Image (cartoon, grey):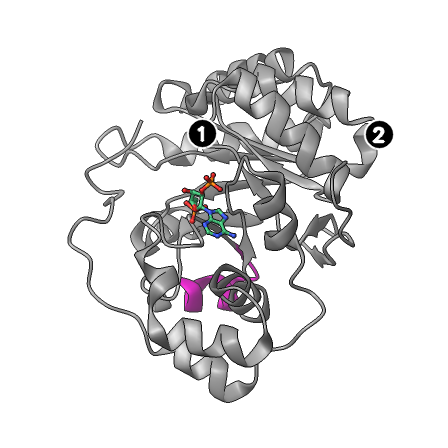
Amino acid sequence: MNPIVKAAPKTLLANGVEMPQLGLGTWPMNDAEAATAVASALRIGYRLIDTAENYGNERGVGEGMRKSGISRPEIFVTSKFNRQWHSLEGARTACEASLERLGLDYLDLLLIHWPNPDQDRYVEAFHGLQRLLDAGLVRAIGTSNFKPAHLQKLFDQGLTPHVNQIQLDPYHLRSDLVAIHEAKGIVTETWSPLGRGNQMLADPAITEVAQQHGRTAAQVVLRWHTQRGFIPTPKSADPVRQAQNLDIFDFTLTDAEMNTLNGLDRPDPTMFDADSFGH
Ligand code: A2P
């Protein structure tokens, strides 16, 4: 029997669509793992599920949704498409293919997965996303891994994503990017919110705050994301961890504790750079 946790509160996107404030990441799950993990997460109380063409698990995500017994309108599903679809027609083809794999007739959010500036066709891809929005195939549109210069090229054309999903955690604050999101009303969704390798979860600055609240380090970090206004998508296939990661909306970090975590930013030369990495 899965534990049941109260669903996350919701954030309003700029077009009025409601998005849950915490979701399940599904990379690097395969179809079978995703089917089990998504069904478990939805039964526990998750309502936001994050997948991508590139993860190769959209069929499993769709299966997990159907197995969960949770009705489609209650679930907010995000997918993302690869560089080969950066065109007006490509965005539509990519969307239809994701829908077919997921077994759905609309997506809640579709993102350009990486800007791929070498190809320089993400503005066209974004126009393609707008058409999908107008056609009702997606409820909201956005970008992933876009840096300030990539967003600026969209702004120059009068285009603004509803969401930019980026790698962000207390060790990677991305303050320049977050300031732009805030100025433009773009919601910051965060991938690897627990810091990928997990060493961050053993940082004494974080474990001390966790002890103060009788919570785990992961819960403190996820609460920090949501108090900053970010939407974290921690990945876990373990129902106990899934429940723990969602169960963060009944305690509050103090300003001093928030500042402690805000002070942990550090350079990371190994971080993916969207100017040179993408698919
Ligand atoms: P697992 O899938 O075995 O639970 P991120 O989303 O930041 O990339 O983090 C994913 C990693 O963090 C995975 O290795 C996941 O392992 C682990 N993880 C997820 N939730 C927790 C948790 N509550 N405590 C510790 N590790 C966690």
Q: Residue 28 at x, y = what percent?
A: 42, 29
The residue under label 1 is 125
- Asked whether residue 158 is in view, the answer is no
128 w.r.t. 43: above or below: above
Front in this rendered view, residue 240 or 124: 240
Q: Residue 15 at x, y = what percent?
A: 70, 50
Q: Which mark is residue 81?
A: none
**Which residues are the magenta region?**
177-188
272 w.r.t. 195: above or below: above
Q: Residue 190 at x, y = what percent?
A: 47, 52
Inspect the magenta stretch and tell me whether residue 181 lies in it. yes
The residue under label 2 is 71
Amino acid at circle 1: Ala
Front in this rendered view, residue 262 or 278: 262
**Residue drawn at x 35%, y 53% as measured from the top left:** 198
Q: How many marks?
A: 2
3D distance between C-alphas at marks 2 and 1: 31 Å
Left or right of 117? Residue 170 is right
Secondary structure beneath label 2: loop
**Residue drawn at x 50%, y 22% as measured from the top left:** 91
Going by the picture, which residue comes out furthest to the front?
1
Q: Main secondary structure of the magenta part?
A: helix
Q: Nearer the viewer, mark 2 or mark 1?
A: 2
Badge 2 density bin: few <14, some 14–19, many ≥20, Cα 10 Å: few
Left or right of 267? Residue 232 is right
12 w.r.t. 275: above or below: below
Quadrant for the C terminus, please.
Answer: top left
Amino acid at circle 2: Ser
**Residue drawn at x 27%, y 42% as measured from the top left:** 274
Front in this rendered view, residue 187 or 185: 187
- Asked whether residue 62 is in view, the answer is yes
